[in-house]
Image (tube, grey):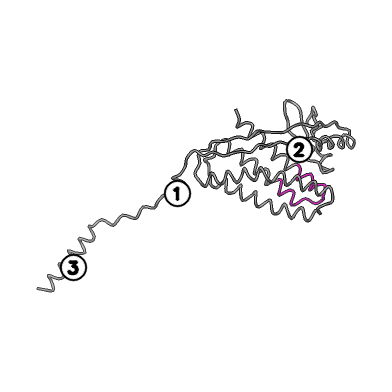
Amino acid sequence: MAKVTRALAAVVLLYALYLSPLPAAPRQAAPVAALSRETRILTLPALRRYAAVISLPEGGQARLCAARLARQGGAGLILEQAGEYRVYCALFDHAADADRACQRVAEQTGYAPQTELLSCPGARVKLSANAAQMEAVTQAVGRLEELPGQMRQLAGALDAGETRRQEAQALTEVWRPQALDALEALEKTLAGEEDAFCRRVTEALAELCDDLTAAAEAAGESGLSSLLRRGGAAAEWAYVRLVNDMNP
């Protein structure tokens, strides 16, 4: 009888355990970055460059001009503006250097380039972002600020014989992963949450990555100089337009 009683007690205990609710799984805390989404301020520095620019009425003429400039190490960047095609020979930090470039291009090609100012004031942009997103956007904008100038300087060093092609391409192999890492971080952290400003930063940085890839694979010194100048000019033009659009 005692054995039966113990057996019944065991059955009752098992049944009670079966009916008892399972303990709730511990709730995982949301990532801190996701909880700290707030309005943050991104400061965009001013930029001032001088461009040697050739204005042409037709796209075909502009493409021929750009190809000729590229063979001589020029940027050959074509932008359509106000119904005309503008071919950028190169960008410079000082107006006097741009003036000399205009004179040299005119003597070599017969075109009539003019010196033009490419500039933007500083700006403060409000972004709704968490800490990781803000870090990614800041890094991406930083790459757009610093790499174009370094690319222009390297092109000048190549033309002056101060740097060999192998050394220059080694530098592009350093810059390219920097730009690619910044682009990957931007795309990963935003993941469909980007606003118009962040989309434009992403597009400009993606184009800069493509230009650095092309420069790393360039076969000759003039081709490398041209790609460095074109990539730098395109990135700085995109930056200037972006910042100017942020200012009322």
Q: Quadrant of residue 234?
A: top right
Q: Which mark is residue 77?
A: 2
Q: Which mark is residue 10?
A: 3
Query: Which residue type does callout 2 highlight?
Result: Leu
Q: Which mark is residue 32?
A: 1
Assign a secondary structure to mark 2: strand
Q: Which residues are magenta?
A: 211-229
- Give the answer, above or below, for where 111 lies relative to 212: above
Residue at the limit of the structure toward the left, as seen here: 1
Between label 2 and label 1, give the one nearer the viewer. Answer: 1
As measured in the structure, the alpha-carbon distance from the residue carrying label 2 to the one carrying label 1 is 44 Å
In primary-sequence order, the first of circles 2 and 3 is 3
Query: Which residue type does callout 1 highlight?
Result: Val
Name the residue at 72% across, 44% down.
Answer: 149
Name the residue at 60% across, 46% down.
Answer: 139
As measured in the structure, the alpha-carbon distance from the residue carrying label 2 to the one carrying label 3 is 85 Å
Assign a secondary structure to mark 3: helix
- Give the answer, above or below, for where 11 lies relative to 165: below
Please provide percent x and percent y for residue 27: 36, 52
